[in-house]
Amino acid sequence: MQNSTPPLFKQGIPALAKLVVCLLIGLALMVVDFQVKSLDFIRNQVSYVLRPLENIMLLPSDLFSFGEDYFTSRSSLEKENLSLKTRQTELSLLANQAALLAVENQNLRNLLELQKNTNFRTVPVEILFNPPNPISQRVVINRGSNHGLNLGSPIANDAGILGQVVRLFNNSAEVSLLEDWDFAVPVLVARNGLRAAVVGAGRGNLLQLRYLPVASDLEVGDILLSSGVDGIYPPGFAVAVITKIERNAEQNASNVFCSPIAEVNRHLQALALIYDPQWDAKPGSNSGVPSSTGRRQTRPKGQP
């Protein structure tokens, strides 16, 4: 015997009626919950039960967001760090340039003051380069015969004598420095007026003080000034400072070594001294010491 379906289910409830009933029930529950908050407990319990499942479902999204934020922050930090390093380098470069300009400006001021204090003509020059040479010590400057320089013109900066012109061109000149081999400058000791000659010994070697009286009164630290007796270097310019004295009691002699006071690598700017002792020397500055020292003459050949 077959089971018969009840008449109610056999006919079925219309779908629209089911929808309307569900909507009415949902609306009624919403009104009741809004008025008396009677479903808060149930909602909280359901939310508590479903929260782990919600976290698991949101885990991929959270991981993706975390990774995106991490790499975005790292990239931003790297860019910011690079920008700060670049800015720091720029500021350091600007500071170095400002310091260099300040030094050069002070050097120019010193040269201007030196020009004011000399009673003869001077020509500002700039050291262009130092030609590589294992023996001689020379530099090239940017002024020549067209600017009034002559063979033998001394070159000096605010510290003292650098050397003299040994090769002359129209718009440039080659300057032999004090350290150049066999280069000689008549000097006197500022402390006691003792006269001698500073002689170059080649690149990398100390200058030597020659033609001294026996048992001369010399001390380490004594300043040597140009005496002016050769008619090439004006008197009173700093030349060198005594740095070492080797005394030989048996031979009753001394080896005296000194270092240039004016450093050629200190500044690029200097002055060419257009000095003529016939017109520029002060009274009494040329007397007392012969100009010949037995070494290469500081006055080039052909000079009167």
Image (cartoon, rainbow, N blue to C red):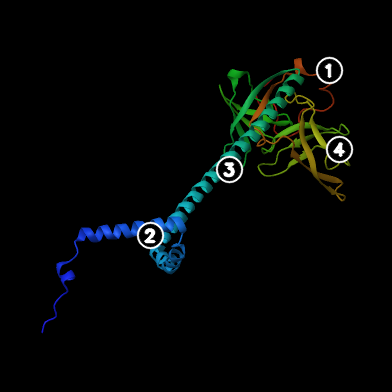
Position of residue 52 measured from the top left corner of the image (x, y, whole percent): 43, 68
Check disc 2 and report its element: helix, strand or loop. helix
Q: Nearer the viewer, residue 55 or 158?
A: 55
Q: Which residue is mark 4?
A: 213
Identify residue type, mark 4.
Pro
Query: In the rendered image, which residue does mark 2 sit on?
Result: 29
**CA distance separating discs 3 and 1:** 59 Å
Q: Amino acid at mark 3?
A: Gln
CA separation in Å, label 2 and label 1: 125 Å
Q: Is residue 211 above or below residue 47?
A: above
Residue 283: give its label.
1
Earlier along the polypeptide chain: callout 2 or callout 4?
Answer: 2
Residue 153 in view in this figure: no
Q: Mark 3 against mark 1, which lies toward the viewer?
A: 3
Classify mark 2: residues with Cα within 10 Å, few (<14), some (14-19) or many (20+): some
Identity of the residue drawn at 80% across and 34% down: 224
Apparent side of residue 302 relative to residue 79 in the rendered image (left or right): right
Three-letter amino acid code at the position of disc 2: Leu
Q: Are marks 3 and 1 in contact (CB under 8 Å)?
A: no
Residue 292 percent location from the top left of the image: 76, 29
Q: Quadrant of residue 293?
A: top right
Q: Residue at x 77, y 20 (%)?
A: 117
Other residues around mark 1 within 10 Å, as few (<14) / some (14–19) / many (≥20): few
| Label total for image | 4
Q: Which residue is mark 3?
A: 88
Image point (51%, 50%), residue name: 77
Q: Is residue 19 left or right of residue 148?
A: left
Q: Nearer the N terminus, badge 3 or badge 1?
A: 3
Mark 3: secondary structure: helix
Residue type at the position of mark 1: Pro
